Image (tube, rainbow, N blue to C red):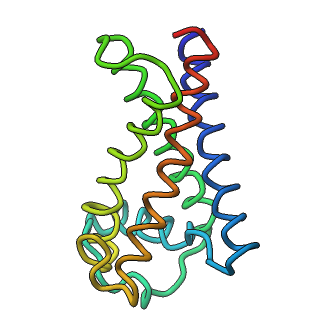
Amino acid sequence: MEIFHIVIIGIVSCLAMDMWQRLLKLLYDINPSDWGVVGRWFLLVMSRGKIYNPTIDEEDPIKNELIIGWMVHYSVAIIYSVFFFILLEYEICSASLMNGIIFGLISVIVPWFFFMPVLGKGFLGINTPSPLMACSLAVGSHIAIGAPIGGFYQIFGY
């Protein structure tokens, strides 16, 4: 049953992030993450073995990149769920909404220091038109993932 819970919590947390981003679009006209670009990056990593692709936005679209990007997005959320489960198993933290939020805040390291740089946006989004906005959006999105992770593990009794 644990694997089922891990996957479900990952999926639900990812849905929470997606709903958060849609709310930002509705209220403030802030575009959600472009999972097509993530799919294109992933496909280029698989086909060319090239992780760093600073001109990803200039690359021609690749067939099925959007669906691949969504699959990568949900897979990463499930991986976050796995990591939180490991923290619980080793009693590094307990399952709670607050610990989920803290986990989400810590997990923002991934977009700031991996995904943004490999997509040519620089560390902490320094190469974006608004680095503070890029970093802030990542923080909000990762809180939106972390809170349900911690909360649902608590609900499931972990």
Q: Is residue 64 above or below residue 141?
A: below
Q: Check the image and name the residue furthest to the front.
A: 98
Q: Position of residue 83 (x, y in %)?
A: 37, 29
Residue under the point 49% across and 39% down = 146
Residue nearest the viewer, comparing 23 with 120: 23
- Residue drawn where x is 64% and y is 16% of the image: 155
Examine the rendered structure and indicate whether residue 109 appears above or below residue 85: below
Query: Residue 97, percent across and down?
Result: 53, 29
Tally the marks.
Answer: 0
- Residue name at image x 61 percent, y 24 percent: 152
Please give the name of the residue rendered at 43% of the width and 67% of the height, measured from the top-left corner.
136
Q: Is 10 positioned to the left or the right of 125 in the image?
A: right
Q: Closest to the observer: 118 or 84?
A: 84
Query: In the picture provided, is 97 more to the left or to the right than 135?
Result: right
List x then y, in percent, for residue 156: 62, 13
Could you say which quadrant of the image residue 43 lies in?
Answer: bottom left
